[in-house]
Amino acid sequence: MNVKIEKLIKQFAKLPRVGTRAATRIVIGLLQDKTGRAESLANALLDASKTIRPCKQCGILTDGALCEYCLDDTRKNGQLCIVRDLSDVLVLEKSGVFHGRYHVLGATLSGVNGVTPEDLNIANISSRIKNEGIKEIIFALPNTVEGKTTQQYIISSIGNYEIEFSELASGVPLGGDLDYIDDGTLTLAFGGRKKL
Amino acid sequence: MNVKIEKLIKQFAKLPRVGTRAATRIVIGLLQDKTGRAESLANALLDASKTIRPCKQCGILTDGALCEYCLDDTRKNGQLCIVRDLSDVLVLEKSGVFHGRYHVLGATLSGVNGVTPEDLNIANISSRIKNEGIKEIIFALPNTVEGKTTQQYIISSIGNYEIEFSELASGVPLGGDLDYIDDGTLTLAFGGRKKL
């Protein structure tokens, strides 16, 4: 393959959760396009890389000092939802299930990947609790060992505020066939069974 | 979501075979990265969009007038493999199954998507047959109605050269469980069964 194309694919493929296959599709799609899409996308990306930064308060990517959620006072309802990254915010927003403020960690603690508390966006959680009158912190982190470890770390580091902590329920997804559900989820669903 | 980020995701998501989910991952991955990956990737893409063009002979993307396959005289073995796009070339090269020259159409005929013969890179196939001494044309197009229609169109448009045409075999993939194979493939595999 042409060296330049190969390099581009490798650059895309290095992104988190993007494999070589998706990267190859994207690069070929871009370079085969005859309407100048590659150039306009490169310019948009260049512009974004210069202007988009994490919101100073919550960590959501934005081109202002504060993001749209932190600027929206109707969302100051005492609830703070802690998520790993922006894509989690998008999923929650799409569902319309949450109307409070967000806090984006940027990662979860991981011994294997060398992610330590210093790598997480957690320094200002305590000051947010005070300034925004947070009464409940809802953890919407990945349902993994890393997610749970991170959750425990944050709870223990927050100190003595009068605050409620909660996490998303574990269990069988809606429409989920029991055949296709892993043992861990089944165990959690069983343990958390509801009386009827 | 921030308007700039939303726009970027939409631009990526418009690429062929890239959905909103992959596009979102890529954009967030790029913008969250702290090592300047977004900027360097944008610059690489900008450079590629200016220098990468289809090979004048076969249509493979390259930064020269001719691609590496067309420049390689050891590949002038009388075989020409017709594929839809560069990703098909990459798959075939990875398998090491083919050692001749390629011809990339860029698309397949499709009434639904409005792809007509004028949109295909086919004008120079006849001259390639003459100039490169092609004896066999192997169609490695998608095994779909569009692929078969395109194949028929090319065969009928090539005219009176003494040439062999072939297409990839249809059937059960290696390791393929019959349970998971669609009826169409099963019918083809049955019809094309081999005597032992």
Image: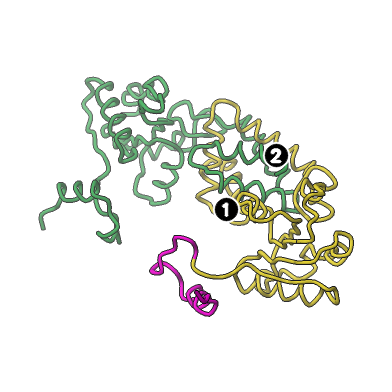
Chain colours: A green, B yellow
B160 on left or right of A89: right
Location of residue B112 (image quadrant): bottom right
Where residue B13 appears, x then y in whole percent? 58, 51
Location of residue A52 (image quadrant): top right
Where residue A90 appears, x then y in whole percent? 45, 45
> Looking at the picture, which amino acid does disc 1 mark?
Val
Q: Are marks 1 and 2 in contact (CB under 8 Å)?
A: no
A137 on left or right of A53: left
Location of residue A51 (image quadrant): top right
Q: Is residue A38 magenta?
A: no
Q: Is residue B177 magenta?
A: yes
Residue at 15%, 47% in the rendered image: A191
- Circle 2 sits in a helix, a strand or a loop, which is it? helix
- Circle 1 sits in a helix, a strand or a loop, which is it? loop
Residue position marked by numbered label 2 in the rendering: B45
Q: Is residue A125 above or below residue B144?
A: above
Q: Is residue A1 above or below residue B143?
A: above
- Distance from Cα at disc 1 to Cα at disc 2: 17 Å
Q: Residues within 10 Å of mark 2 (few under 14, many from 20)?
A: many
Protein chain holding label 1: B
Of residue A30 and residue B53, the one placed in the foreground of this image is: B53
> Looking at the picture, which amino acid does disc 2 mark?
Leu
Where residue B64 appears, x then y in whole percent? 83, 43
Q: Same chain for labels 1 and 2? Say yes or no.
A: yes
Residue at 22%, 33% in the rendered image: A164
Q: Residues within 10 Å of mark 1 (few under 14, many from 20)?
A: some
Residue position marked by numbered label 1 in the rendering: B18
Q: Is residue B77 above or below residue B191?
A: above
Looking at the rendering, the stretch of residues picked out in magenta corresponds to B173-196
